[in-house]
Image (cartoon, helix red, strand yellow):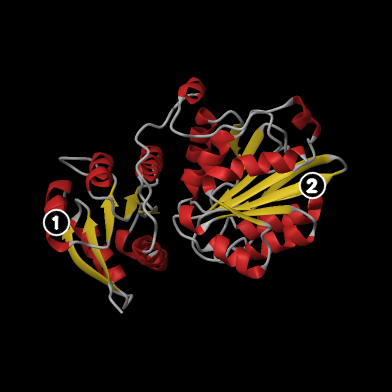
Amino acid sequence: MAKIRVLTVDDSALMRQVLASLLARDPEIEVIGSAPDPYIAREKIKALNPDVLTLDVEMPKMDGLTFLEKLMRGRPMPVVMVSSLTEVGCETTLRALELGAVDFITKPKLDLQRGMSDIAQELIDKVKAAAVARIRSPQSQVPNSRSGVESETSGLTRVRGTAAMLKTTDTIIAIGSSTGGTEAVREILMALPANTPPILITQHMPPRFTKTWADRLNDQCRVSVKEAADGDSVLPGHALVAPGGYHMALSRNGARYTVRVTQDPPVNRHRPSVDVLFESVATYAGRNSIGVILTGMGGDGAKGMLAMKEAGASTIAQDEATCVVFGMPKEAIKLGGVDKVLPLGDIAGAVMELVRH
């Protein structure tokens, strides 16, 4: 079996050395070279033809975003970003995902070598997922305001709202995603009308990134989007995003829905976990809910989606052709928890059709 050939691009010699040593732990991966800046990286890509690129966000001569945009236009390939946990680092990394990067890892703030060793398996898993990922065309024009949303016409089919939809305020829409999910969720939310029933979203993402992502979605979508806080009300026209490092679960007190945000132990190695969200929706909303599982590696969400279906919910999985990684939907389908398998572009319309009926 051929090894996954990786090229690392980072201006720090120490970071390049650490990445190479961590990736070398896996016998299926071979680091074939490294580059200190995008100009050298460009030549090495031509000469070595790597399968996956790890790319630092902040570099001299040319920043990682500019290089990524040029790369995805001229020679699209799987890229895993290496990001910092700063506010600027979060914004830049999310922009990189919009431009077509498959995923990202975060650098530890202190003790680089020990901190990177702690995330070695995550790095290896993400490089392996990137190697088999479907590379999306770059989204070079992403609106950054609600007014921009109204004029944006990039082939997105928007779902019209109707007054009748407002009667279905007890319907809960639960969405789970991982690798490739930030863009998949964005595409769905941007297609939904402002009076959509309440939406709960669990996306595998580390702390700090979820708030930045939710704020960006809020600027781009007609529904309001925020990072969830414990006790938040679940309301029509609003989407709540599980905070990185916390589980989010639906709760109910009489007719009122809220969310619980907890630091209970990880489930399926994840916190937040899609299974935690889906199982809580199955318990408290049952047939008055719709479950959607999107692109991502692993099996998180499969058992929860089956629980939703058994409780009477309608369930949808993204199809293989439009997934970046067809792991989570595949496992949910295999377990028997999925009613419909649809291309990403059809999911928002299908959800609203279910809401109306």
List x then y, in percent, for residue 193.
Answer: 63, 30
Q: Position of residue 136 (x, y in %)?
A: 38, 48
Dot 1 lies on which element? helix
Q: Closest to the observer: 240 or 243?
A: 240
Q: Residue at x 30, y 69 (%)?
A: 23
Within-10-Å neighbours for mark 1: few <14, some 14–19, many 20+: few
Q: Earlier in the sequence, mark 1 or mark 2?
A: 1
Give x and y (percent) for residue 156: 50, 34
Q: Residue at x 36, y 46 (%)?
A: 100
Answer left or right for 258 relative to 347.
right
Bin the neighbour count of mark 2 within 10 Å (Cα to Cα): few under 14, some 14-19, many 20 and up: many
> Could you say where residue 218 lies in the image, as x and y percent from the top left?
54, 31
99 sits left or right of 257 in the view: left
Query: Which residue is at 62% across, 49% downward?
Result: 175
Q: CA distance from mark 1 to mark 2?
A: 53 Å
Q: Secondary structure at mark 2?
A: helix
Question: Label 2 sits on what residue type?
Answer: Asn
Q: Residue at x 16, y 53 (%)?
A: 41
Decide if residue 251 is in sight here.
yes
Which quadrant of the structure image shows residue 2?
bottom left
Q: Give the amino acid type for the residue marked by disc 1 in the picture.
A: Lys
Q: Give whichever of 280, 169 is nearer the camera.
A: 169
Kindly identify which residue carries mark 2: 288
Q: Residue furthest right?
A: 254
Q: Is residue 340 left or right of residue 181?
A: right
Residue named by callout 1: 46
